[in-house]
Amino acid sequence: MRMGTAAALVATVAMAVAGCSGAGETGGQAVPSAAPATATGPVPAGLDAFYTQTVSWGSCADFETDGPLASALECARVTVPVDYDDPDGATAQIAISRSPATGDRIGSLLVNPGGPGASGLSMANVADMTDLAERFDVVGFDPRGVGASTPQVRCLTDAEFDADRADPKVDMSPEGVARVESVNAAYAAKCAERTGADFLEHVGTHEVVRDMDVIRSVLGDEQLTFLGFSYGTRIGAEYAETFPGNVRAMVLDGAVDPEQDPVEETVLQAAGFQQAFDDFAANCATVDRCPLGSDPAQAVARFRALVDPLVERPAETTDPRGLGYQDAITGVQQALYSPQLWGALRSGLTALADGKGDSLLMLADQYQGRDDDGAYSNINDAFNAIRCVDDPPVTDRTVVDAGDTAYRKAAPFLDDGRGTGAAPLDACAFWPVPSSAKPHAVDAPGLAPVVVVSTTQDPATPYQAGVDLAKQLGASLITYRGTQHTVVLNGEACVDDPVVAYLIDLAIPAPDLTCS
């Protein structure tokens, strides 16, 4: 399950209710010439030309790959080596955006929304209603391979992606497992063919944090000030481990625990979504004509009665695709990211009970990055490419099978009842390039004080992951009691006030701060 800020998901759906660049070739631009005489801050050996390049800010008109960007933003590209061990080789372009400070400027605040694979250019607006907009140039960026950055990871055509979504993939018989594995292997091969294996090998967090340090230098900051949401916390933690002396301040909200292996993380996330579903069902039961009924104890059974028939027959939609099983589940999960979407989820399930699937299909399209013309952003291809190099592949069938059983037990509302104790290997098991990291505790000696924010009933990044990451980093922990994914800059003063004070003045939040 992809992870990003709830605020971004809510904003995207709100725009849809109210109303692309292709893969590139590596080596498209030469190593930049060094314009300034010196870089800002320390420079790793052999990378002077990248750390001393000049940023040319301009219009964002050519950077809009995932929806419109605010007209007040400025955009630019920063050149980085594809392989930091070969700085004279092929290069990539990292797209960045900026909302300039309106007052007494401290420096730059770099922001990442999560994913992996989510475009971050719109995040330059995230602090507009706070004092951060006065004191910082707020800078968003598309990590390598993502959005407006080039080369771009691409695996499926738009038509292929539509077809993939229409496949329910619920047959866990030996034949069904073998068929899904063949689909996953073909997907991995297409990623290598259409993106290029040389670039695909270097799209992971290991390289992203090095790109961030180049960005820090060319923006003129001696040290990095960073706000990372969800997967952005993994970026932040790895940056802290790689460049601990280069961190000025760092806020990590909706934490990913670097010690967790992929199977453990998936099962814990399933449990988080079950909790969010239960909270939604309890809330729904208090309103008239709740599509899940007035008894929350019956909500899972009523939900399954609504979605299970879609395996055999999609629901009608004004779009000729119809609403299939996989899209129904995706639409529901997206709406569980935030209580602000519960109204849309109630409406979608009510419509589904009447045989209409338009609302849930819209939610699924927004999550999958599909626009009204049927074109997809590359968020899903980038998500898969990044996670497959960030973690070791799981190829032990006993581990995969046990993980599927545990997943179904952790999230009954997601269990289609077709489990057999066997499950297919995912695309990462067939990935054409090696992984570049493995689960481990973060070790960042000399790191400045940082802040971790964790929400008690976060569906995508469970609360305990934030507790554990804070311990690894020796960080201050802010606990938010709620059912949503991420909370910083969502209007909760109890959280936002200490976070803003920390980022501006480096004031450490009160110990064991808990908000609700």
Image (tube, rainbow, N blue to C red):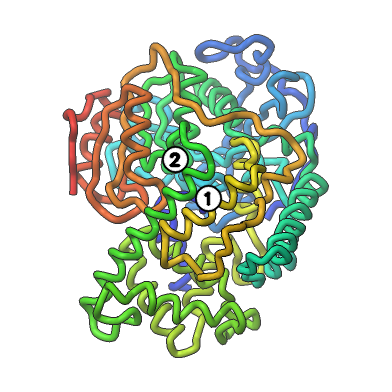
Horizontal relation, residue 47 to residue 132: left or right: right
Residue 299 in the image: above or below residue 435: below
For the residue pair 129 and 380, the one nearer the viewer reads as 380
- Which quadrant of the view contains residue 166? bottom right
The answer to whether residue 427 of the structure is visible from this angle is: yes
Q: Residue at x 35, y 76 (%)?
A: 346
Q: Residue at x 54, y 57 (%)?
A: 68
* Image quadrant assignment for residue 302: bottom left
- Name the residue carrying label 1: 403
- The spot of residue 64 in percent (x, y) is 59, 53
Q: Nearer the viewer, residue 389 or 177?
A: 177
The three-letter amino acid code for the residue at tag 1 is Gly
Query: At which x and y percent is residue 493?
Result: 20, 45
Q: In this orientation, which residue lies closer to the viewer: 366 or 179? A: 179
Which residue is located at x 65 percent, y 17 percent? 35
Picture mark count = 2
Closer to the N terminus: mark 2 or mark 1?
2
Inspect the image, locate mark 2, and give the three-letter code of the amino acid beneath it. Ser
Query: At 22% from the left edge and 49% from the top edge, which residue is drawn?
Result: 481
Q: Residues within 10 Å of mark 2 (few under 14, many from 20)?
A: many
Residue 99, labelled with which disc?
Answer: 2
Query: Does 178 appear above or below 252?
Result: below
Give me the C-alpha separation between circle 2 and circle 1: 44 Å
| Drawn side of residue 418 relative to residue 31, left or right | left
Give the farthest residue toward the bottom: 354
Q: Is residue 475 above or below residue 66?
A: above
The spot of residue 251 in percent (x, y) is 35, 33
Regarding residue 147, the answer to whether it shows in the image is no
Disc 2 on helix, strand or loop? strand
Residue 376 position, x and y percent, is 65, 61
SS at circle 1: helix
